[in-house]
Amino acid sequence: MYHTTGLRRDQVTDLCAAIHQGTVNADRRWPPSLGLFTSVVVTLTYLRRNRVQVELAETFGVSQSTISRAITAVTPVLAGLLSECVPTADELDSRSSYIVDGTLLPCWSWVSREKTLYSGKHRTTGLNVQVACTLDGRLAWVSDPLPGNWHDTRCLTESGVLDKDVSHWMGDKAYVGMGILTPIREPARRELTRWERNFNYEHNAIRVRVEHAIANLTTWRILHTDYRRPFTTFATTITAVLGLQFYRQA
């Protein structure tokens, strides 16, 4: 079950118990033919693997519309239930050092939203999130999703994390001038000195850990391959996945 859903069976069972306890009858809209446990498994499988719904329908022996109803019902419940597991910018330890980087969560290109979703850097459409991890590579914080055509510096500013002292944070050259420790850019009229090259080498050797943290986060394939459901549900899905990721590593 772990390789399919990203969670152990006992974790799935605990989630089901929490959902059952925290929802009233009006909120229990998962299909009766699947029941709560299977509806949660279907939703976790969808989030983990981003499988098309007709494949899931064939696997679980139901119709595609039943799979769609299960995902539609369970995803916002997971997002609300696990929101407390997701650290906010205010909860980051101001005395700790973090490594920050941005990544694009891709989605289909909707004509009405193309201008705000299209990232020239990634050459696709999606939402930008800023990710911070500790120096040992442990995921510490993820910002709210912002338009994909925004630069990382704008996204980090909008996230509110710069209200803290970030002078001991690390980031790539995209964050030059924001008070974060970044690599040294090569001047226009000279090459980098040996100590500057050594500094950049050591900096990059540490900074790569945030890329590993992002890669681990996007093992939830719903954040790595194009999001196909209605765009209005994308933010809730991202919140649900972040809650599941922090729930896993707690």
Image (cartoon, rainbow, N blue to C red):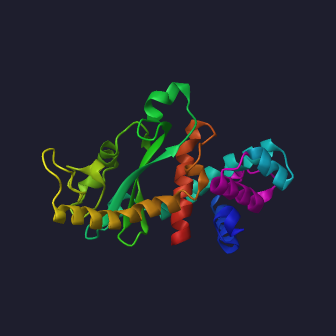
* Residue 108 picture quarter: top right
Residue sitting farthest toward the left: 189
Q: Position of residue 61 (x, y in %)?
A: 87, 52
Q: Which residues are magenta?
A: 24-52
Which residue does the image show at 77% across and 60% down from the upper left?
Answer: 38
Total numbered circles = 0
Instruction: Write down the quadrant of residue 230 in the picture.
Output: top right
Q: Does the segment drawn in magenta span residue 168?
A: no
Work out which quarter of the rendered image holds the N terminus and state it. bottom right
**For the point 54% across and 63% down, which residue is it?**
245
User: Is there any visible trace of residue 104 in the rendered image?
Assistant: yes
Picture coordinates of residue 248 (x, y %)?
Answer: 56, 69
Is 183 on the left or on the right of 228, as rendered?
left
User: Along the horizontal axis of the image, is 88 left or right of 163?
Assistant: right
The answer to whether residue 53 is above or below residue 96 is above
Res. 203 image quadrant: bottom left
42 magenta-colored: yes
> As displayed, is residue 246 above or below residue 46?
below
Residue 24 shows in the view: no
In screen coordinates, is 52 left or right of 241?
right
Taking 152 as reference, is 243 above or below it? below
**Residue 168 position within the rendered picture, expressed as x and y whole percent measured from the top left:** 23, 65
80 and 233: which one is in front? 233
Percent x, y of residue 214: 47, 58
Q: What predominant SS class does the magenta segment belong to? A: helix
Q: Furthest residue to the top?
A: 112
Q: Residue at x 40, y 36 (%)?
A: 149
Foreground: 247 or 138? 138
Q: Nearer the viewer, residue 164 or 173?
A: 173
